[in-house]
Structure formats: C-alpha cells, structure tokens
Amino acid sequence: GAVVSQHPSWVICKSGTSVKIECRSLDFQATTMFWYRQFPKQSLMLMATSNEGSKATYEQGVEKDKFLINHASLTLSTLTVTSAHPEDSSFYICSARSISGEVTDTQYFGPGTRLTVL
Amino acid sequence: AQRVTQPEKLLSVFKGAPVELKCNYSYSGSPELFWYVQYSRQRLQLLLRHISRESIKGFTADLNKGETSFHLKKPFAQEEDSAMYYCALRNNNDMRFGAGTRLTVKP
C-alpha cells in the first residue's frame, strides 16, 4: 500500500532555532499534503493544507510565518518551525492524498515527528 | 462548519464482548466519513469509510443521516483491537477528526 514517511522521527532543539520536518509520499504522487499537530492525549488538529506548486492554506489560529510549508514536488512537503519555543513542542503528523490510481480517495498518514523545544 | 464528536474518551470491554464506538457529526452537506485506527506506537491508518460499506477486521460502521451518526461496531472484540480510534469527516480536502476513543479489550 501507499506509504508516507517523515524525517526526522524526533528532534530536540534549543529555543529560538528553526527546525525542518520532511514529509514524503514514497510510492505515489500527492497533489495535496496536510500537516497536523497532536498534543498528548488529544486529537489531530489540522494546521494547514498544501497543494503542490502553490501556497499552503492555513487554519485559523496557525501562524503562517511561524510554520512555513513548502510543497515543492508531488512527493515532498516540508514544514519548518521557525524560531521555535517550548510551546511548539508537539507531535507533528503529515498526510498525503493521492491523485491517481486505486488510492485516489485515501489519505495516508506519516508516522509523525516529535518535536521537543528546550 | 463540520464537526465530529466522539463522546467517549475511554472504552473498556472484555474479550468476546460486543463493542460500539460512538461518532456523531454535524455537517450541512453530504458527508464523507471515515474511521481511523492508531495502534500503540504505530501511525494512523484507515480502518474503513462509509462509501465502501465494507467490514474490516470484523468492524462495521453505518452512516445514519437521520441521527447524524457513524458508530463503529464489532460483535466480538479481540485483545488486538485495543487501540485509539478516530472518527473523521471530510469535506473536499478538509479532513476533521474527532477527539478519539481509546479502546481497551481486556482478556
């Protein structure tokens, strides 16, 4: 089946630094990728939706200048947390939706990236 | 605006007992509804969707538009069903998740 990978799986950084998280669809092309944030024991909250080659659409309350999303190709999207602070510590999950084939309608999820900001 | 409600955060049953995880939604259009499951230390994965009307791992879910519900059911729970279950509603590209229900199946 379709696989979505994320890198890194976990990262620890100092406050004020920037962190980039990659999301790749390994065996399918994704016109749309999604970034979610999950706090402990809570549900996934959609942060933004990105379409290949265009600007991401951010959910209300999500700062686009803080969470930079780039969807440069049909298989890669990146989320950069700029000037990270401890309150940005969370589990970030990406998801990709295929454009063709039998997986057209399914949204596949990455394993997530745990970010800890000291 | 679309909204998904899973009223139970925790649900515990004994092996072999029936289980029902509740999901209610609010949406003005025709909803696309899904159940996702997350086993311990694994990624979120699709369990089933309402348009397929299929049974996966013994689970079924019927969309009830009158009650705006999409409850997940299994007649005989197994220990390996213990996981976090999320109900989700999709509107075009916008997928919204419920808060999730943690199911524990005891031996």
Image (cartoon, rainbow, N blue to C red):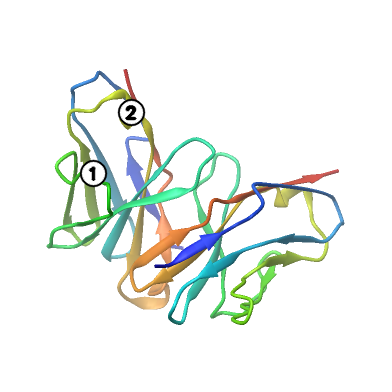
Q: Secondary structure at mark 1?
A: strand
Q: Position of residue A63 (x, y in %)?
A: 21, 44
* Quarter containing the C terminus of chain A: top left
Q: Nearer the viewer, residue A62 or B12?
A: A62
Residue in the image at 52% along x and 71% along y = B33
**Amino acid type of disc 2?**
Glu
Report, in whole angstroms, how far the alpha carbon at label 1 lies from the one at label 2: 17 Å
Q: Is A79 left or right of B97, judged from the image as shown?
A: left
Q: Secondary structure at mark 2?
A: helix
Q: Quadrant of residue B75?
A: bottom right
Residue in the image at 12% along x and 62% along y = A53
Q: Position of residue B51 (x, y in %)?
A: 54, 80
Residue A78 lies, with reference to residue B74, above or below; the image says above
**Amino acid type of disc 1?**
Leu
Q: Position of residue A115 (x, y in %)?
A: 35, 30
Check if mark 1 and mark 2 are on a common chain.
yes
Residue B59 lies, with reference to residue B66, above or below; the image says above
Residue in the image at 65% along x and 76% along y = B62
| Nearest to N terminus: mark 1 or mark 2 | 1
The image's mark for residue A87 is 2
Q: Is residue B58 visible?
A: no
Q: Position of residue A46 (x, y in %)?
A: 36, 53
Q: Is B59 left or right of A21, judged from the image as shown?
A: right
Residue that label 1 marks: A79
Mark 1 vs mark 2, foreground winner is 2
